[in-house]
Image (cartoon, rainbow, N blue to C red):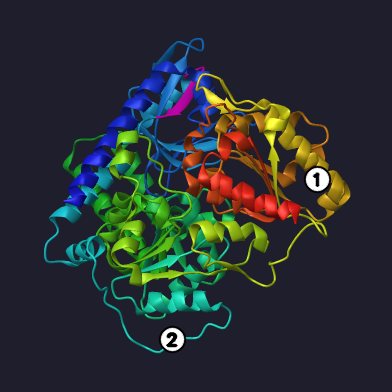
Amino acid sequence: MALQRQHALLQLEYEHERDEFKRLGEVYGVGRKVKRGDCWWPIRVGRSYYNSLNQLVVEVFRGEDEEIEHNFEYGRQVMFFRTSGMDSITYYDFAATVSYAEDHRMVVIVPDAAVVSQLQSAERLGVQLSFDETTYRLMLSAIDRVSRAKGNRLAYLRDLFYNPGKAERFTFDPLRFPWLNATQERAVNEVLRAKDVAIVHGPPGTGKTTTLVEAIYETLRRESQVLVCAQSNMAVDWISERLMDRGVDVLRVGNPTRVNDKMLSQTYERRYEAHPDYPQLWAMRKALREVREKRRGTEAYHQKVDRLKSRITELELHIHNDLLAQARVISCTLAGSASRVLEGMKFATLFIDEAAQALEAACWIAIQKAGRVVLAGDHCQLPPTIKCYEALKGGLGLTLMERIVQSNPQVVTLLGVQYRMNEQIVQFSSEWFYGGQVESAPEVRHRGILDWDNPMEWLDTADIDGKEEFVGESYGRINRAEAALTLQTLQDYFEKVGRQRVLDERIDVGIISPYRAQVQHLRRLIKQSAFFKPFRSLIAVNTVDGFQGQERDIIVISLVRANDEGQIGFLRDLRRMNVAITRARMKLIILGDVTTLTRHPFYRKLYEHISLIQNA
């Protein structure tokens, strides 16, 4: 059975990632882990306190001058350690969990007060990510439960998704939404008609989020509450914020990635603390801790403890049920849907945003709570991250969204009008990935920064003899000459546009490279450049994955690969390139070795498309 194969492949991925994590932990020193964003060292330990969920937490700070992006986020397991020199590491023998993470501050859940004392008295202290088995355990468990399901809604959805069939739907005249285009309006109607499943396929710039928000808003006219999930915290934040802008009461379960007052105020923890009965609960918890500290073994002591515990439990349930009853939308990651906060809850409708980036098993975690499912995303953009080659080759990367597109194409609605790019930028993507079905809205069709400017350019780095090379302990791939040319090209374009105009109009730029080592090299060059100092707030440099869901006026892509063998590695993942080239609103500049890259038909076609534009 296909689900059993999914289970085996997921187990393979789990074992590979666990073993790789252990190997890298042994090979890399503290400095390398810090650079990878997996470790903070040295750290300062701040105050400890009990949070609203009665968990003992401790604050952890890293240096304010540390600019490395980190990978700590809500729910991740961490280990504390102390050092004597960079190479001598002693780990503490307790597990801790991230409750909240910002750029330079973290709140970590710890087991008891003794642990806090150890940390506060330690010197040369650090914290690093530990291998987190929780999500894998949830996914494997979900697949097992789906496989065993018989005669219930979960079994029905499983059989529908895995076999060609006819999904059930309601029949009614289409509703009108004059503020949406025709394909968006059709997508909302198809979501409302669906009894089982609907898919909103949103190519870049087509207003997928706008359409999904409208579909959720209309669904809430018919249902009291819905569950909204996505693979990443960032994607959950984005859809949650848009729903809040629409006036929908959202309860955010988990830790927002974009830390701001607007999102934080909607989290379960903050809403819990803001409940009118919380001060009473806090006082009773404090009283219980004080009574327990005295530890008198008398009958009166035990009776008092039991009374306090009973009243505390009663109040906790009251606040919890009150919060869940008030919320129209509950939002969380797919794994977060298994939170004890949502234990036992069922929803008529589950919405999964960015569904094409989620492993199938992760989707099943949330689907267990739902009667019907609406998936939104684009399987022609970023796929799920698979680290084990055997698991990828075996088909673990096939998402549930793709599976349903194949088995039940009639439930898919393609959004066909994009509002982001100049038509010459979107034309190539539309033809290669979407059968030419994506068109530009009239207001963006001819958008540009300069009159008579070519919206797309390709600079051949063979002209500067740019060659790729490996650097660093991780053997990251960079192309120094191409990096230098990237910045020179951007500088020349700024001069052409006018430096003051760039600043006045805040013309923003994204510099993208598929290779992390090249990204880091480009960031260093920009930091060292006197020319770019006034423009730093307008320039973002990141990998393709780092730009998912974003857009910029100007996009510059450094492809790095340049060799005699024509090897292009994971540039063969064309979905990532689709993301890269469709981030640009008005200007796209690609730098790459034409001889190396155009041996692949995709890059050859792209180069020909750009050459026609440049020579027109």
Q: Secondary structure at mark 2?
A: loop
The residue tagged 1 is 493
What residue is shown at x 84% (from left), y 54% (from top)?
504
Q: Residues within 10 Å of mark 1 (few under 14, many from 20)?
A: few
Taking 288 as reference, is 74 left or right?
right
555 or 357, which is in the foreground? 555
Whether 452 is among the magenta residues is no
Q: Quadrant of the C terminus?
A: bottom right
The residue tagged 2 is 174
418 or 274, which is in the foreground? 418
Question: How far is disc 1 from disc 2 in space, using C-alphas?
Answer: 48 Å
Q: Mark 1, mark 2: which one is toward the viewer?
A: 1
Q: Which quadrant holds residue 328? A: bottom left
What residue is shown at x 68% (from left), y 73% (from top)?
442
Q: Amino acid at mark 1?
A: Tyr
The image position of residue 518, as x and y in percent, is: 61, 31
What residue range appears in magenta? 122-129
The image position of residue 536, as x and y in percent, is: 75, 41
